[in-house]
Amino acid sequence: MTTKPWRIGLLFSTTGVTANVERAQLNATLLAIEEINAAGGVHGREIVPVHYDGASNPRQFRAIAERLIEADGVRLLFGCYMSSVRKAILPVIDGFRGALFYPTFYEGFEYSPQTIYTGAAPNQNAFQLAKYILAKHGQRVLFVGSNYVYPYEINRIMNDFVVQSRGKVVDELYIPLDAGAEDIDRALKKIRKTSPDVVFSTVVGQATAPFYEAYADAGFAPAIPIASLTTSEADIAEMHPGVAEGHISAATFFATLGAPAARRFTAAFRRRFGEDAPIPSAAEAAYFQMHLAAAALARAGADDPKRVIAEVTEIEFDAPQGRVRVDPDNHHTYVWPRVARLDAQGRFQIIWNPGVRLKPDPYCVTQSLDDWSADFVDAPAS
């Protein structure tokens, strides 16, 4: 029997506009690999990661994916954050040249037979955030986002949710991924002019902290909260203390979760990467998907993409967020949505926990805001 290591490819940035969250995803993946190897690997063979910095650049990531498959002999790829990067990778793995495990919440409306999606689909985070803010903060919403695929697509979906609830989108604007002070000031002027009840932000990466800090300086908070799917613990760590207090997010995992599996994960992550290391939901998905993939690899007995993907849909795993599994019909994952508000220390405190594992519906075929009980705001947050 061979003892040759299993080589896998990691597609995460350590530089560029989204490096802060992608470094956390990379670290979580490495932690999972270390745990798997410490337990004996897969069939006695270590998992060895091969990683190159994609610098938050879709073209660079596509070239890296080609290199991993053609030069490094890698067949299983893990990573990507921005949707523009994921879409750049998909042609590279076409025809099962490789398989991609994608650990980031995204806009949905996609299926790839070679891809496993372990982040939330819109019905597993956007839906819950819309339900909460419209019930608790008002009906007039302004959208502001970064200028790339995800913000445009998720805003289209959120617009439908707002309209369903007889709300109104008062404006929609976009700033560059590398937005400067002038771009942010333009957005703030629009917010001041329209005076929404809530700002829904899909600003990502390095522009996030400056946007929140300028928002605080402009005096909008706490009267007009920012609700965001893209603002994570990695972004909060780059802000001045107290800047983000009162703002809201929805995700499948928060580092403040008290469940035993969540506490074990956060403790292990911080022992390995530092007590102040941020742990966003996209990192938790990167962690559990590696464990899922290793279990599928063990069942398949080979890193053949078709065989691994077929096996991964047969497995459940006790992830930090709760027990997860992949839907064999659409390759998205059953996950656990939660809504949280930031406290004065920059920690997300859960304010609504539906307590259900949701089937992924990446096409939002059946979603209606009326599907959820009106009593949800009184549900326990633990």
Image (cartoon, rainbow, N blue to C red):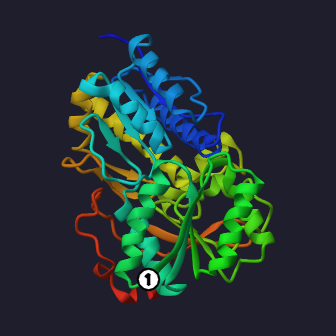
Vertical relation: 272 (above or below) 40: below
Query: Is residue 36 left or right of 60 when viewed as pictured?
Result: left
Q: Residues within 10 Å of mark 1 (few under 14, many from 20)?
A: some
Q: Position of residue 246 (x, y in %)?
A: 66, 76
Q: Residue at x 46, y 16 (%)?
A: 67
Q: Residue at x 46, y 40 (%)?
A: 84
Q: Residue at x 52, y 82 (%)?
A: 140
Question: Which quarter of the image is occupied by the N terminus?
Answer: top left
Q: Position of residue 302 (x, y in %)?
A: 27, 21
Which residue lies under the disc numbered 1?
167
Question: Could you tell me if residue 380 is visible in this image?
Answer: no
Query: Is residue 132 left or right of 3 when viewed as pictured?
Result: right
The front one of 377 and 369 is 369
Secondary element at tag 1: loop
- Residue kind at label 1, given as amino acid type: Gly
Vertical relation: 333 (above or below) 252: above
Vertical relation: 20 (above or below) 132: above
Q: Position of residue 234 (x, y in %)?
A: 65, 52
The front one of 272 and 171 is 171
Question: Could you tell me if residue 271 is visible in this image?
Answer: yes
The front one of 264 and 207 is 207
Dividing the picture into quadrants, the one containing residue 315 is top left
